[in-house]
Amino acid sequence: MTRILFPTDFSAYADHAFGFALQLARRLGAEITFLHAYNLAASADMMAPKEIIHALRAEEEIRALEHLQAYQARMQTEEEIPITPVLRTGYPAEAIIAMAEEVNPDLIIMGTKGATHQLDTFLGSVTSQVIQEVRVPVLAVPSEAPEASIERIGLATDLKQESSINLARLGTIARALGAEVHCIHVTDKAGKSAPEDVSGLERHFRQQMAYDRVHLHLRYDSQVATALEQFIQEQQINMLVVTTHRRSLLQRLLHKSLTRQLALEGRIPLLAFHDP
C-alpha cells in the first residue's frame, strides 16, 4: 500500500493541505501517517526547573495527541483511509527527515504559506529544508491553492534529467487522478539546440510514464519564469512538477533575483522530485 507522510503543526496551512492529502490517498489507495513534532528547547535554555520542563512536555504531548486524535476521528468518519498519528519531540524539519527515513513514505505532503518569490519563505523554511534533504517526493501546498481536483499537471523539464523512476511515479499519480500531464521545455535557442523530434520526445514521456494523456510543449524564451508563468495560465495547470538537482530548476525559478512572481506562487501545489 502507498504511504503518505503528512507533517502538521495544526495550523490553517496544514489543514488546507490535508484536503490534497485526502484526494491523493483516496485515489492512490494510500494510508496516511500524521506527524507532529514539537520542541521544548527554549524552556530548557531558560534554565527552568526540571519539574516545570517535564510539566510543559506533558502538557504539549496531551495537546498534540488531542489534535492528532481529532484529525483521525474526523477523517475516518468521512474517508475509509487508514490513518496513523505519530508524535515526536525535536525540531520539525529534523523530525520529518528522520520519520521519512523510518517509515519510507512514497510521498510527503506539507502545507506552505506561499505569497513570496524567495524559496525559503515561499515554501517555508521547514518545507524547504525537507525538500533539499529527503529523497522522497514532496508536495508543497500553498495556502491559497484552490481546493479543486488536480486535473492538469505541468512538468517543467529540461529534456535531460528526468529519471525513469520519477516519470513512472508521475505516471502513477496522474493515472490515479485521471489528470493530463503537460510537459513544458523552455529554451532561448530556437536553432541547432532545439529538439528536432517533438513527437518522438512526447512518445518517450508517454512510454516512461506508462500513460497516454501526456503532451509536450516547447517555448522559446530567454525568461524561463515568464514563459512558465504564461504556460501555467494558458494550460490551466493546477499542479507543477519539478526535479531538484544541482543548480536545480526549482532554485532558478524561485530565485530572489526574479522581478516577477510566478503564477505558481501561492496558487498551485508544487511537487518536487529528486534525482535517484
Image: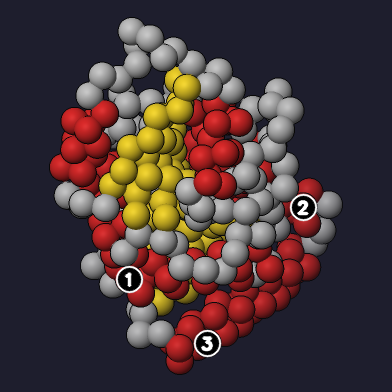
Q: Is residue 65 left or right of residue 239?
A: right
Amino acid type, callout 3: Arg
Under tag 3, what secondary structure?
helix
Name the residue beneath numbered marker 3. 74
In front of the other: 1 or 183: 183
- The residue depicted at 34 percent of the width and 54 percent of the height is 180
- Residue placed furthest toward the bottom: 77
Amino acid type, callout 1: Arg
On-image quarter of the C terminus: top left
- Mark 3 and mark 2 residues within 8 Å of each other at the beta carbon: no
Q: CA distance from mark 3 to mark 2?
A: 32 Å
In front of the other: 12 or 61: 12
Q: Quadrant of residue 71?
A: bottom right
Name the residue beneath numbered marker 1. 27
List x then y, in percent, for residue 31: 34, 71
Q: Is residue 169 left or right of residue 183?
A: left
Check disc 2: other Cα within 10 Å, few if <14, some if 14-19, many if 20+.
few
On-image quarter of the N terminus: bottom left
In front of the other: 275 or 102: 275
- The residue depicted at 49 percent of the width and 36 percent of the height is 132
